[in-house]
Amino acid sequence: MSEAPKPGSYAQTDPTIVASYPTTLPSATPVSRKKPTLASFSLEGKTAVITGGARGLGYVMTQALVESGADVAIVDLNGDEAAKAASRLLEQWKSENTDADKLPVITSHKADVSNAADVDRVFAEILAAHNNHVDTLVTSAGLCENFPAEQYPPDRLQYIMSVNVNGTYYFAAALAKHLIAVKKPGSMVFIGSMSGAIVNIPQPQAPYNASKAAVRHLASSFAVEWAQYGIRVNCISPGYMLTDLTKRILEERPELGEKWRSLTPVGRMGDPKDLMGAVVYLSSDAAGFVTGAELRVDGGYTVT
Ligand SMILES: NC(=O)c1ccc[n+]([C@@H]2O[C@H](COP(=O)([O-])OP(=O)(O)OC[C@H]3O[C@@H](n4cnc5c(N)ncnc54)[C@H](O)[C@@H]3O)[C@@H](O)[C@H]2O)c1
């Protein structure tokens, strides 16, 4: 009897897969390319707000938006970290680019996404800082906590829902109101989670899972309602990614890391950089006919 395949090694352990492909490829005529990518993937001329952009997935996705030509406004509960993130990104851009005309505008803003009044206040602040021009939103502010469902503290339940669900809602509504008023199209990318579609094991996190299912369905609902205004709304659902959020959990329960990797077909946790292409694509004109979609970036976790 053959050994069970290890995660991440399916193609190598199944000889029928290898045998069904030709061993030599037909020679292709080399094509010279001036541009490394399609122009429609460029975010030049766009201004993006990223909630939770001070660190983790939000920070790396902000980096991707800046590298693709967008101006950005980083919003975070931790105002100092947001300010540091903004200056780090600007320094990085300067070290990699010489074209001063294209220097991006990168601003940072402190706000609590779970507070509707604070969201309205900070959205006005962002518009003022960006010449009344904002057309892109990425909502990465969020949290996850583990308690057995029957013991979940009611105040924590209320808080996780208000950050993950209401926070996404408030920012989306603020941008939609603005875009409808100025009659401009726009794009929103909500950061959901594969937990919105499956139930993670072994850690108990029912409210988080429910909050991410809500985020995914908010994206679909807004996509339908706002399509008439040229506003696209999509959702990225990451699998297990290595960030401060998950590092904290793994410090307390290191055995979880092995379990998570073993349940992920590619055999590893995601690197935040694995989200860069996905967020740029959905924010860009290349995704002009894509709305209400969910893009799972989970190493195959949810298809097993
Ligand atoms: N890390 C993962 O494995 C993973 C997997 C799937 C989905 N996600 C989702 O991705 C998003 C980012 O996760 P992360 O791992 O980068 O987390 P993180 O904790 O590293 O970063 C979250 C950021 O959001 C900010 N934030 C938290 N509450 C806020 C509030 N009320 N108002 C404004 N800002 C607030 C934090 O200050 C922090 O900078 C979350 O929505 C999370 O649920 C993460």
Image: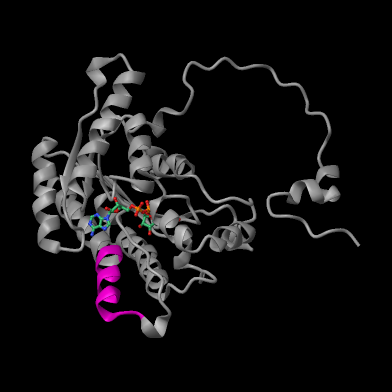
Relative to 167, say whether 182 is above or below: above
Question: In what quadrant does ligand 1 lie?
Answer: bottom left
Residue under the point 46% across and 74% down: 204
Does 38 sit left or right of 18 as displayed?
left
**Residue 301 placement: quadrant:** bottom right
Does 280 sit left or right of 75 as displayed?
right
Prevailing SS of the magenta stretch: helix
Residue under the point 31% across and 14% down: 98
Relative to 180, say whether 60 is above or below: above
- Can residue 293 be seen here? no
- The N terminus lies in which quarter of the figure? bottom right
- Can residue 301 be seen here? yes
- The C terminus lies in which quarter of the figure? bottom right
Percent across and percent down for residue 134 are 19, 42
Percent across and percent down for residue 259 are 60, 62
Does 184 sit left or right of 31 as displayed?
left
Look at the image and give the residue range highlighted in magenta.
Answer: 152-164
Residue under the point 23% across and 43% down: 82
Does 129 sit left or right of 89 as displayed?
left
Question: Which residue, as the protein is rendered here, is positioned at the far right?
Answer: 1
Relative to 210, say whether 3 is above or below: above
User: Does 222 appear in magenta?
Assistant: no
